[in-house]
Amino acid sequence: MQETNIPKVYDPQSFEKKWYKFWEDNKLFHAEVEKGKKPYSIVIPPPNVTGQLHMGHAMDNTLQDILIRFHRMRGYNTLWMPGCDHAGIATQAKVDAALREEGTSRHELGRKKFVERAWQWKEKFGSRIMYQLRSLGSSCDWDRERFTMDEGCSKAVREVFVRLYEEGLIYQGTRITNWCPHCNTALSDIEVEHETEMGHLYHIRYQVENTDEFVEIATTRPETMFGDTGVAVHPDDERYKALVGKTLILPIVGRHIPLFADSYVDPQFGTGAVKVTPAHDPNDFEMGQRHDLEQILVMTNDGRMAANTGKYAGMDRYECRRCLVEDLKEQGFLVKIEEHEHAVGHCSRCNTTVEPMASKQWFVKMESLAKPAIEAVKSGKIKFVPERFTKIYCNWLENIRDWCISRQLWWGHQIPAWYCDSCGKTTVSRDDITVCPVCGSHQLRRDEDVLDTWFSSGLWPFETMGWPEETEELKQFYPTSVLVTGYDIIFFWVARMVMMGLKFGGDIPFKHVFIHGLVRDSQGRKMSKSLGNGIDPVEVIEKYGADTLRFMLITGNTPGNDMRFYWERVESARNFANKLWNASRFMLMNLEGFDKTFVPEKAQYSLADQWILSRYAHTAELVTKNLEHFELGEAARSLYEFIWNEFCDWYIELSKARLYDKENTAERRVAQYVLSYVLEHTLRLLHPFMPFITEEIWQHIPHEGKSIMISSWPDNEMAKINDVAEKNMTAVMETIKAIRNIRAQVNAATGKRSEVILYFADSNMQKTFTDNKGYLAALAAAEPMTVWTDKSSRPENAMTAVVSGIEIYLPMAGLIDVEKETVRLTKEITNLNKEIERLAKKLTNEGFLAKAPSEVVEKEKEKQKGYADKKAAVEERLSYLATL
RNA sequence: GGGGUUAUAGCUCAGUUGGUUAGAGUGUUACGUUGACAUCGUAAAGGUCACAGAUUCGAAUUCUGUUAACCCCA
């Protein structure tokens, strides 16, 4: 027995937690391996365990949950794998900061204790994030929750590292990498963000040995001068041809360095002569290799000048730059300083300017891994939605460089490599070792570094399913169905997963990549901590409910595009929830005597019943189609429009008469049936978008089953489509609108009943209206309704409107303002003329008649006739007005 | 330098294979609390679909160019 009364206002706080607990307690999110059942699976983009979810996460997870709930209702064996990412640099920075506040530091604590602290952090914030995902309504399979550093993932990471090493795809080497002096670690190329900045170009002259001649070089980073081991010019540069091969004297330092030619040098840039610092610049590094130059590191890991820089040793790199420039100037080496705009790399984590520095790091050879990953997308095995991201993905992979995977951090997967101090050999091993397998020595040191976080997240789709074991989960749920993520991590994550999935998972990791944009603030700026413009999704959920937030995040949004956050839009979504709530409340208040077993005969349906069932069927089809094509915003929009503009505005209003008339049980129960059917099924369509409110209402209204989330998706409703009913109902609705319009024109009280006289061009339509007089009475207060058949005399003192095939007269003695009415109708004529002209042009165009499909031509002809009839009626009316 | 996105009502945005009198939310104006909802209802005003070409019987939609803003890569 359902309750007949629910609260007047939608109050999400009163039920959201309750239903989440209900779903979770009943294991409705849990997926078991069921052989033979169609699988649908998504692995969550694991949020960083650093802190809390932001609006972007809310959007990402809403999209996933919609897809998951939709497919679950459609009968797929649906798995949504949740988990967190250990987020090496970011988390270490957070823990560092926490320690600093306690007056201690990671170095004081030591590695072991520090890692313990990081685990504590993970426990605290990991569970907070999972709580936040729950409050959003995410239907993740929590029994399977994973963490990138849990035992299974660690095992997978080791396995992959060892295999890649054994294949020679992982190697150690000294190369220029991007060094962050603040985070104190090497970074990969994509962890560096380039920003154009105004800087200076310093022109410095280097003396040619044993002459009074100088070669003028230009540099943006003079402080690296201490590491200069050469100066390069272009081989064809006439200015320097004679000097190639000579020796130069490095100012201040006094080192003798060669001047050589290399075609890398751009003769147009600066002076055409560049200082070469192989240990501090990637291009110089390569030139250094070609010309066999020494690499001299002149900076320490924290961005200070190294011991080999004399009096500058210990200075910060920028402080050194200032001093050095002063000194160069004093000693006459500085020629000039120019303003210069250039791109400067910044650490994507802390925004510190990175320092390119030579160091020994671990790398992955990417070329052979990238090829199949490109192929998988080009062949269409993996599809990006929207498609344009294919190009971005392929371009990056086609120009890929080796991936620096070692990080000088403590929080992460420690690299499984051991160095033997006795024989000097390096051993990479799946298991920890204490004895050197080469010489048997116990003098082993394990590599201190950890792996790039993305190395383990790259394995996420299969490591979470038990790889390297050949599990049933892998067999059923891998490849996953779709990956939902933002365009900002296509390189970091998507591309790496594809490469790793193909290499180790034995197949692509997902069939679709559904890319979404960023959630920005109302001014279009990125939400960020430093701007303080971020909006906490939890705050929105607490104020307005998760359903509201979810609905707001997906309406009016197209795949791949950014969106702006507006509180007004949140309110609009909340109002929609309230509307649905009250529509349901209305039904519940009128369900007395409802018979669950009653199903009406076809003949019992009213026009409105047939119409709403047909509209509902269209909506179901549209929502389904749009969900299948990842057009979630469109799907939500069609539900919004159906519920508000059709179901509430028209159907509920029209059902009132029948529901309030308790004597007429027969009609009343038909109305109850249709109302209940349409609402219950619409709730199912809406459930993926707004899981809580739909469950709350569903549990109150007549229903079958335990929970709406496991009810079946309305898939086969096409039989309810009824074009005739829609056409007739549309005419009724247009007539009602026209009458309302007239009444508004003359400021007639909307509630006041008054007569309406109609003239029909079509007798079927006339029957429709006479059969449904009540509709005009109920929604336009137009009563009684009289049908005029004699065309020769028209009602006098009446306002007029014309809709297709129907002339409407509203007798309004004393209310007609002839002048105003004339103006209004004249304007109408102008509009009609415009349309008629346009159509005439079209319909006399031979090309159109010959080439356009016949149904289009027919449609246009019908339109033309409609406008012409309308115009005739309006003109007649105008001439009548002229006689008054 | 290469690539991409965006340009539609005052504001924020939809408009999926070319055929709608170009839509929504919000804002604005007028009216309205009769028994789902004022978090509401009714009605209205508001757009040369950035600009210029091209393709087509037909372009907001396809193509080319221009302009502007933003983003990614180097």
Image (spheres, coloured by chain):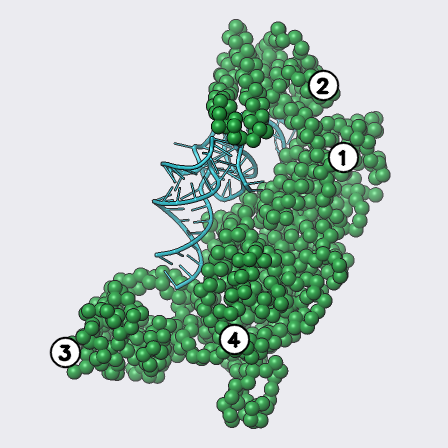
When the figure is inspected, residue A123 is found, relative to residue A38, above or below; the finding is below
Q: Is the residue at mark 2 from the same chain as the one at mark 3?
A: yes
What SS does tag 4 mark? loop
User: Residue A116: horizontal and vertical position, in percent?
Assistant: 60, 77
> In green, which chain?
A
Q: Can residue A316 be seen in this view?
A: no
> Which of the marked residues, 4 or 1, is nearer the chain's N terminus?
4
Q: Mark 3 points at which residue?
A: A212
Disc 2 residue crowd, few under 14, some 14–19, many 20+, Cα 10 Å? few
Choose mark 3 or mark 1, whichever is in front. 3
Q: Mark 1 points at which residue?
A: A674
What SS does tag 2 mark? helix
Q: What residue type is labelled 4?
A: Leu
Choose mark 4 or mark 2, whichever is in front. 4
Q: Name the residue under label 2.
A: A767
| Quadrant holding the N terminus of chain A | top right
